[in-house]
Amino acid sequence: MKAKIIKLLELKQLYGRYACGEHYTHLRTNALKPLFVQNSLESTIKNCTLCNRIKHCKEPIFGILHPQSTLCFISEIPLVDASGHFLQNKSAIMLQNIIQRVFMLPLTAVSILSLVKCDGLNPHVDKSEILSCVGFCLAQLQKITPKVCILLGNEVAEYILGRHLERGQILWHNNRNFLLTHSLNELVRNPSLKTEAHTHFLIAKGQL
């Protein structure tokens, strides 16, 4: 178990270097070699086989990444499919409604990312799966300059910011505004939280 954790931490360091512009053409283990042989971040993500979640979907989900997006949502699991269409579950449909009805933005003005890139229909995520994948999300963030990034849930805040953040509070971090609200899964399970989340979204809207 300890060896696996060390390996995951080493991978996280590699992802961090990759996010800063380094590209890898040779790695010591064959299992890791395909990750960095291509310059395209999208190709790198879609060829990932780091964790077992890939066994339950056709391919990793890149998400929606628009370089000129003014708003970015980051969730724990994917909310769109490989074609960039919203998944047909309550969380994804809720996000689609939030974008259209609260922010009144076209999808072309929004980026939608996730900590893990596979199996968007499975809400149960293991910490090791996030550690394997979070570097991809951080690399994607380097490619956009939204006016605010909305973190959907405490787990997302922990891995993106490395700290806990009070919900509804704007935090300036790494040259970006971040705002934490409830995860969509929380809102589905507990609709009474929607009023508070709506207030958070209005605070984020005020930054646009």
Image: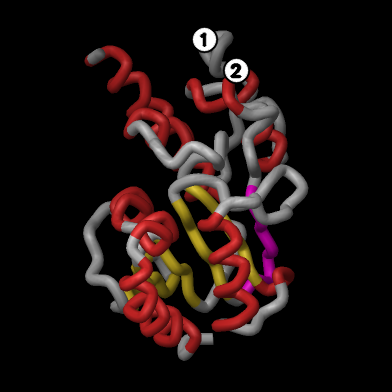
- At which x and y percent is residue 154? 29, 56
Q: Which residues are magenta?
A: 63-69
> Cα distance, mark 1 to mark 2?
7 Å
Q: Residue at x 23, y 56 (%)?
A: 163
Answer with the quarter of the image where residue 61 lies.
Answer: top right
Q: Badge 1, how many Cα within 10 Å: few under 14, some, many 20+?
A: few
Query: In the picture provided, is 150 more to the left or to the right than 169?
Result: right
Determine which residue is flagged by label 2.
Answer: 33
Which quadrant does the C terminus fall into?
bottom right
- At which x and y percent is residue 45? 63, 36
Residue 18 appearing in the image: no
Q: Residue at x 47, y 54 (%)?
A: 75
Query: In the picture provided, is 6 more to the left or to the right than 80?
Result: left
- Which is nearer the eye, 176 or 155? 155
Q: Total marks drawn?
A: 2
- At which x and y percent is residue 115? 46, 45
Magenta-colored stretch includes residue 177: no
Residue at the bottom extreme of this rendering: 206
- At which x and y percent is residue 145? 57, 69
- Which is nearer the eye, 19 or 121? 121
Element under label 2? helix
Element under label 1? loop
Q: Amino acid at mark 1?
A: Thr
Determine which residue is flagged by label 1.
Answer: 29
Answer with the quarter of the image where residue 146 lies.
Answer: bottom right
Query: In the picture provided, is 195 more to the left or to the right than 201?
Result: left
Q: Badge 2, how many Cα within 10 Å: few under 14, some, many 20+?
A: few
Q: Amino acid at mark 2?
A: Lys
- Height in image: 2 above or below 144? above
